[in-house]
Image (tube, helix red, strand yellow):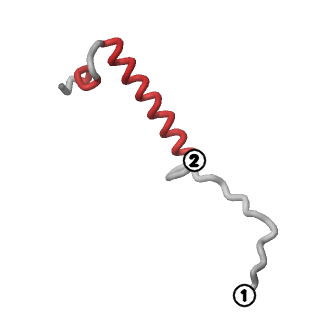
Amino acid sequence: MDKTQPTTTPNIEDPKFGFSKYAERLNGRAAMIGFVLTVAIEYFTGQGLLSWLGLQ
């Protein structure tokens, strides 16, 4: 068996869908924005989110 290593590294683009660093970063940012908006809604309306949506 030949155990030589390749001399160049292939240039592979990161995927734009599925489990990738880009998708996880975007998901984290969306979660932070949603959490801040939920807290703001509860603060300004004086109700919880479920009450504000009419589910409680």
Name the residue at 52% across, 39% down: 26
Under mark 1, the amino acid is Met
**Quadrant of the image containing the C terminus:** top left
The outermost residue toward the left is 56
Name the residue at 29% across, 13% down: 46
The outermost residue toward the right is 7
- Report helix, strand or loop for mark 2: helix
Name the residue at 62% across, 52% down: 14
Taking 34 as reference, is 19 above or below it? below
Dot 1 crowding, Cα within 10 Å, few <14, some 14–19, many 20+ = few
Name the residue at 21% across, 23% down: 54
From the viewer's perspective, tell me whether residue 14 is left or right of residue 27: right
Viewer-proximal residue among 16 and 23: 23
Q: In which quarter of the image is residue 49?
A: top left
Under mark 2, the amino acid is Lys
Q: Report x, y in % for residue 10.
A: 73, 63
Q: Report x, y in % for residue 34.
A: 42, 29
Q: Report x, y in % for residue 12.
A: 68, 58
Viewer-proximal residue among 15 and 56: 56
- Report helix, strand or loop for mark 1: loop
Q: In which quarter of the image is residue 47?
A: top left
Name the residue carrying label 1: 1
Viewer-proximal residue among 8 and 4: 4
Taking 41 as reference, is 1 above or below it? below
Which circle's residue, 1 or 2, is located before the other in the chain?
1
Q: Report x, y in % for residue 48.
A: 27, 21
Name the residue carrying label 2: 21
From the viewer's perspective, tell me whether residue 50 is left or right of residue 10: left
Q: Do the residues labelled 1 and 2 touch (CB within 8 Å)?
A: no
